[in-house]
Image (spheres, grey):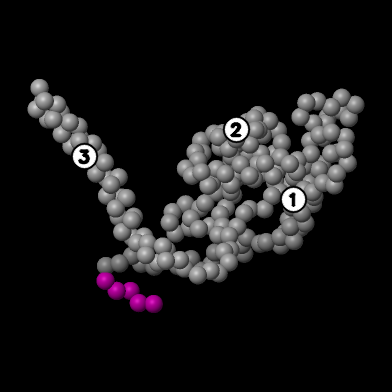
């Protein structure tokens, strides 16, 4: 090891007691078993409740990932209202509510309303006291039905379409030109309104 120029003299600590500072992972199999036991205990404590809460189906963010459907944080108040479920009632039956989320498309809203309706149809609410069932609890016949703890699966992101011939209208349709035109119309809408109002004022002034 050479010493050159006006640099710091190296002081390599080769005699450190490193074996005392090594992090071992010998308890990994034990931890794995402990976690598994905890999951079993939790599942048993939940009774016949679903293992996970119901969440909405949403599109992932940005153009790059929006073809993917994933679980969102919670259902919007508009979706719950359309499905006929109250926000307090929803929390009690395993449906997550997100008061901040907004519906930006009718298709997305419709999809989640259908999801809620399907969940509601499959839902069995056991009464706290079998002798005194309350409003909203399932009937005696419904309680006898077979139960499942699996939640509703997410819908397909792009439903498969059967192969077909391209129509003449589709062949002649100019998608890029249509997008550009609609974008330009939206951009110049304010200026066109101002121009139209100015023209009306001038015509009204001429008539006077």
Can residue 189 be seen in the rendering of this structure?
A: yes
Residue 39's disc is: none
> Which residue is at the far right?
131
The quarter of the image holding the N terminus is: bottom left
> Residue 70: within the magenta?
no
Q: Nearer the viewer, residue 114 or 60?
A: 114
Tags 2 and 1 touching, CB below 8 Å: no
The residue that disc 2 covers is 81
x and y percent of residue 103 in the render?
Answer: 50, 40
Q: Earlier in the sequence, mark 3 or mark 1?
A: 1
Secondary structure beneath dot 1 equals: loop
The quarter holding residue 92 reads top right
Q: Which residues are magenta?
A: 1-5
- Circle 3 is placed at which residue position? 191
Asked if one can make out residue 38 in the rendered structure from this viewpoint, the answer is no
Q: Camera-side residue: 126 or 201? A: 201
Mark 1 highlights which residue? 150
Q: Main secondary structure of the magenta part?
A: loop
In-front residue for pair 196/61: 196
Comes first in the chain, label 2 or label 3:
2
Image x and y of residue 99, in percent: 54, 34
Q: Residue at position x 73%, y 56% from top?
A: 31
């Amino acid at each position: 090891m050479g010493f050159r120029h006006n640099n710091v003299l190296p002081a390599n600590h080769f005699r450190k007691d490193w074996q005392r500072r090594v992090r071992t992972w010998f308890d990994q199999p034990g931890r794995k078993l402990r976690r598994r036991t905890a999951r079993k205990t939790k599942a048993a404590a939940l009774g016949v409740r679903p293992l996970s809460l119901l969440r909405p189906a949403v599109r992932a963010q940005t153009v790059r990932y929006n073809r993917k459907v994933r679980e969102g944080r919670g259902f919007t108040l508009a979706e719950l209202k359309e499905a006929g479920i109250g926000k307090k009632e929803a929390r009690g039956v395993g449906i997550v509510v997100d008061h901040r989320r907004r519906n930006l498309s009718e298709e997305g809203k419709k999809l989640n309303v259908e999801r809620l309706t399907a969940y509601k149809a499959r839902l069995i609410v056991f009464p706290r006291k079998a002798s005194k069932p309350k409003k909203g609890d399932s009937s005696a016949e419904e309680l006898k039905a077979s139960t499942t703890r699996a939640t509703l699966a997410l819908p397909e992101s792009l439903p498969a379409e059967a192969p077909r011939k391209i129509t003449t209208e589709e062949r002649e349709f100019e998608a890029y030109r249509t997008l550009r035109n609609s974008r330009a119309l939206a951009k110049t809408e304010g200026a066109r309104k101002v121009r139209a109002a100015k023209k009306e004022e001038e015509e009204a002034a001429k008539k006077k």
